[in-house]
Amino acid sequence: MSVSALNSGLSGLKAYSTALDSSGHNVANASTAGFIPQQVSFQEQPAGGVIANISKEGSSLASQELSSTDLANEIVQSIQFKAGFDLSAKIVKTADEVLGTLIDIKA
């Protein structure tokens, strides 16, 4: 584990947090007429780590039509995003422990 692993873990925490926020936004607005759900995609960074990109796909619906939010899909994605967040948190914790051990050895 190194500082780059710590940075990758932190970027993962931020990306999965953003993805969870987007999913929550979609669920909260599922009953809103004309709502277009957000789509999340993840992009690897050249120096390591990941970012979450949010976009809206589809055309604007008539104001009387229901949202096109797929609640079953949102639940599945939320579970996946939470698992990714938890994994990123474990990476950060492990990197912190390793760096702490290295500092203790050097001291």
Image (cartoon, rainbow, N blue to C red):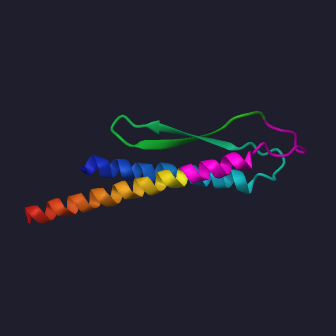
| Residue 68 in view, yes or no | yes
Residue at horizontal 22%, vertical 58%?
98
Residue at horizontal 41%, vertical 53%?
88
Residue at horizontal 74%, vertical 45%?
70
Which image quarter: residue 27? bottom right
Residue at horizontal 75%, vertical 45%?
69
| Residue 17 in view, yes or no | no
Tell me if residue 99 comes above or below residue 43 in the rendering.
below
Residue 34 as seen in the image, left or right of residue 19: right
Tell me if residue 87 comes above or below residue 55 in the rendering.
below
* Residue 70 lies in the magenta stretch: yes
* Residue 58 lies in the magenta stretch: no
Question: Exactly how many numbered labels are in the figure?
Answer: 0
Q: Which stretch is magenta?
A: 60-80
Residue 85 as seen in the image, left or right of residue 1: right
Q: Residue 20's x, y, as percent?
A: 58, 53
Q: Residue furthest right?
A: 64
Q: Residue 26's x, y, as percent?
A: 70, 50
Residue 29 as seen in the image, left or right of residue 46: right
Q: Residue 74's x, y, as percent?
A: 67, 49
Query: Where is the C terminus found, in terms of image quarters?
Result: bottom left
Q: Residue 95's x, y, as percent?
A: 28, 56
Which image quarter: residue 102? bottom left
Residue 12 as seen in the image, left or right of residue 62: left
